[in-house]
Image (spheres, grey):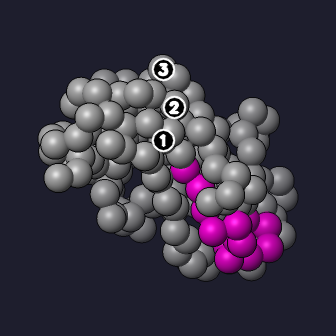
Amino acid sequence: MAATVQIGEKNSGAGTFTDKTSGTIRFKNADNATVDLVNPMVKPPSGTDYSFEKWLILKVIGGTYSQITNIAAYMDGSSGLGTGVGLYAKAVTTFATPAEATSASGYTDAFSYTSGAPLSLGAGPFTSTGEKGDHLVMMLTVGSTASGGLTPSETLTIAWDEI
């Protein structure tokens, strides 16, 4: 039997965990896990609108396994978000209260992480339940050159090895 895991979004200073396994993450101008159209990203007349950070983590909740190793995150390598919209990612060891980003400094284009070259979130081995590996911190930007409207959905994959 395999490990049972959840992918969670953590919000607020308390790091409230919301299960997003096979779910939707909505980038917006608010620190919450609610998938709605409240506090949307807006196309600015000039410059860039930055979303609040989304802090994601793998959480082992059970199953029968010996160890989990090589936690990694990646996209499909091709952004469908359109002109003027960017998605960025980085790995962070310790949780901090999600903030509204003010620049993309310290982040990398999320679409540069592919199945062949993923973002490492921890080598392990991890042998117990609970949150494992580094946090995947993501944020979205909307520039004044964006075409406007809702952006299309993209798929994020978080993978690991287990025995």
Residue drawn at 52 percent across, 23 percent down: 93
Q: Is residue 106 magenta?
A: no
Tell me if residue 134 comes above or below residue 1 in the rendering. Answer: above
Q: Which residues are magenta?
A: 73-85
Q: Nearer the viewer, residue 101 or 15?
A: 15
Q: Is residue 105 visible?
A: yes
Q: Position of residue 24 (x, y in %)?
A: 38, 64
For marks 3 and 2 on the same chain, the one whose residue lies earlier in the sequence: 3
| Residue at x-position 68% and y-position 77% | 80
Badge 3: few (under 14), some or many (20 or more) residues near its Cα, within 10 Å?
A: few
Q: Can you give x and y, in whole percent of width and height, for residue 107 in the image?
A: 72, 40
| Above or below 40: residue 88 | above
Say what secondary structure mark 2 lies in.
Answer: strand
Residue drawn at x 43%, y 46% is 161
* Residue 85 occupies quadrant: bottom right
Of residue 7 and residue 16, the one placed in the foreground of this image is: 7
- Amino acid beneath label 3: Thr
Where does the image place residue 56, in percent across and percent down from the top left?
Answer: 43, 42
**CA separation, marks 3 and 1?**
16 Å
Residue 82 x/y as whole percent: 73, 76
Q: Residue at x 33, y 64 (%)?
A: 23
CB of mark 2 within 8 Å of CB of mark 1?
yes
Q: Is residue 49 visible?
A: no
The residue pinned by badge 2 equals 122
Disc marking residue 71 = 1
Q: In the image, is residue 79 part of the stretch drawn in magenta?
A: yes
Mark number displayed over residue 12: none
Looking at the rendered image, the quarter that the C terminus falls into is top left
Q: Which residue is mark 3?
A: 94
* Residue 86 appears left or right of 133: right
